[in-house]
Image (tube, rainbow, N blue to C red):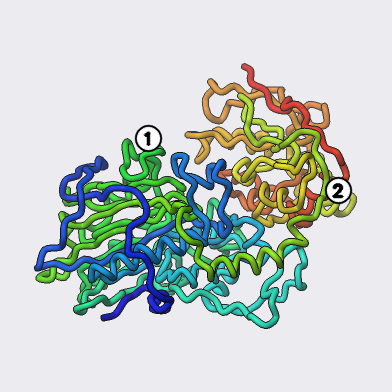
Amino acid sequence: MAFTGRDKKWLRGPRAVALVAAGAAVVLGLATGGTVTQAAPAKPKPTHTQIQLLAINDFHGNLAANPATSSGGNINGTPAGGAEYLATQLELLRDSAKAQGRDTATVAAGDLIGASPLLSAAFHDEPTIEALNEMGLDATSVGNHEFDEGYKELLRMQKGGCLNDGDGQNNQNSCPDPKAKFKGADFDYLSANVYYENTDKTLFAPYTIKKFRGGQKVAFVGMTLENTPNIVTKAGVEGLAFKDEVETANALVPKLKQQGVEAIVVLLHEGGLPSDPRAFNSCPGISGPITDIAKTLDPAIDAIISGHTHAAYNCSINDPAGKPRLVTSASSFGKLITEVRLSIDLATNDVDRLNTLANNHIVTRDVPKDRHLTELITKYQTLVAPIETKVIGHITTPSVLKTPDDSQESPLGNLIADAQLADASTVTNGKTPVVAFMNPGGIRADLASNAGAVTFGQAFTVQPFNNFLVSMDMTGTQIKALLEQQFSGVNQASNKVLQIAGITYTYNPAAAPGAKVVAGSIQIAGQPLVDGTTYRIVTNNFLSDGGDGFPAFTTATDKFFGGLDIDAFAKYLAAHDPYTPGPTDRISLGS
């Protein structure tokens, strides 16, 4: 009897056989179009076999358990997550399947690394790969954040090896233990729709086929959202092409069938948003890209494990043939595990959807910690401590908030923009930036403190991407176009107001897209903006490449790369010690 989960897990001694997390199962045959009927799981028919799939997504290197009072540390008020508990809960679910004669596989839908806490990010996310190896992950799709340090670094995550990064330079240190070189991922990264540009070669294998007891085959197809180049640093994906998710998956169906595969599961780093985020085991009013994708993927595809939106849902969405199909997502940060009991019809070797069950389990913290994960976390906590605990400044309030006012300007956004504007590393040839722009999505948390003292670790939690600052020349006309792009193009639906320093303006939310910034309201250094005048501005390399729907940055000239954004942030706090948050009076609403 072969199990596709890591066999070493079964050799660590007896464990309790139980499904410890709460939740009910979803029977697809009783659900239509996005509503889910709850029912108790039935024993497989003698003509069928069941395979257990365990799935996570958007782990983002959250090795240590987040505070239960934070959104990243609970599900509906229940403390949840933490790699030590996630590992235990995965093993308990596997043990339960094994006791009932089921094979098992563990898969993921991307963003397992990137935008990680300092505990992982300080070591280029090597600790997270090691942790996922220990948890017995079999395969994952590639998410957009897997490209945060570039696709060549992602290849290293798969293959292993160490970076020559100066032994801790820029607060990062590859292979910090000289006796334990980084060996890479035991699991398979999959990227069916990510190609080397102008070739037919994918970055990673497009799929993997797992063979289970009795010769049953299940194909796992891994895909990254097509929009990845617009939301990651350009340099990280330069030389790659991202193709349509539906066209890619559908084209693989006949190829898989030629190999005798009838059961197909897509691991997709794209998702949706249910109208009730607390309903983690159903999907009321789900919307977003996943709905259109699910409705157009080939009916031969039997289930979709999704991610990206950090939402939790357990859905049935009809395929193009009008048949219900499972679509799931397990929140983020290891707070949920999706368990799928994939029912295989032995006569057809295909998935019997009427008897396929799904359940999102909360990763509760009422179980023993996995000692191997505890050892790993403790090791890296010791290694990161000198970086993390260093006090870099003080604030006169308990925290500086990223919560915006009515104009979408925030106190923390102003602080970060001020830090970028003050950073000397972007001054070149006598040109000093006079305006700074910061994308709100890059501000990941409030700036916390310990009785007013701010550590590097707390600053890093705010800005975890290690982006470089870039200064450049933009004309007044280009700056006007940039400001309008906050409310038009891909940003029209939600608006994406940049955080600013050195510039003020007024916009009218009721005006038409392309004409929202009030004429004559833009001022730089207290003077009216002049269309033909060239201004030196600074931003991060993500925006510089046109990220987040701001192509105006790509029209700028004389670009110069400075230091890291986190270093500028830390230096500014040290130079303005103690720091007092100022008013949010740079952007105003008017007509």
Residue drawn at (38%, 76%), measured in percent from left and top? Answer: 10
Residue drawn at (44%, 49%), measured in percent from left and top? Answer: 331
The residue lying toward the viewer, choosing from 570 and 9, is 9
Instruction: Pick whichever of labels 1 and 2 is earlier in the sequence.
Output: 1
Q: Is residue 76 left or right of residue 162?
A: left
Residue 283: x percent and y percent? Answer: 32, 41
Q: Secondary structure at mark 2?
A: loop
Q: Is residue 339 left or right of residue 71?
A: left
The residue lying toward the viewer, choosing from 1 and 226, is 1
Q: Quadrant of residue 358?
A: bottom left
The residue lying toward the viewer, choosing from 75 and 78, is 78
Q: Residue 248: in sight, yes or no? A: no
Binning the other alpha carbons within 10 Å of mark 2 as few (below 14), some (14 to 19) or many (20 upward) gives some
Residue 33: x percent and y percent? Answer: 23, 42
Q: Tag on residue 573?
A: none
Q: CA distance from mark 1 to mark 2?
A: 49 Å
Residue drawn at (86%, 41%), measured in percent from left and top? Answer: 576
Q: Which residue is mark 2?
A: 431
Q: Amino acid at mark 1?
A: Ser
Q: Amino acid at mark 2?
A: Lys
Residue 383: x percent and y percent? Answer: 71, 67
Q: Which residue is mark 1?
A: 275
Position above or below: 581 against 116: above
User: Can you say which quadrant of the picture contains the C terminus?
Assistant: top right
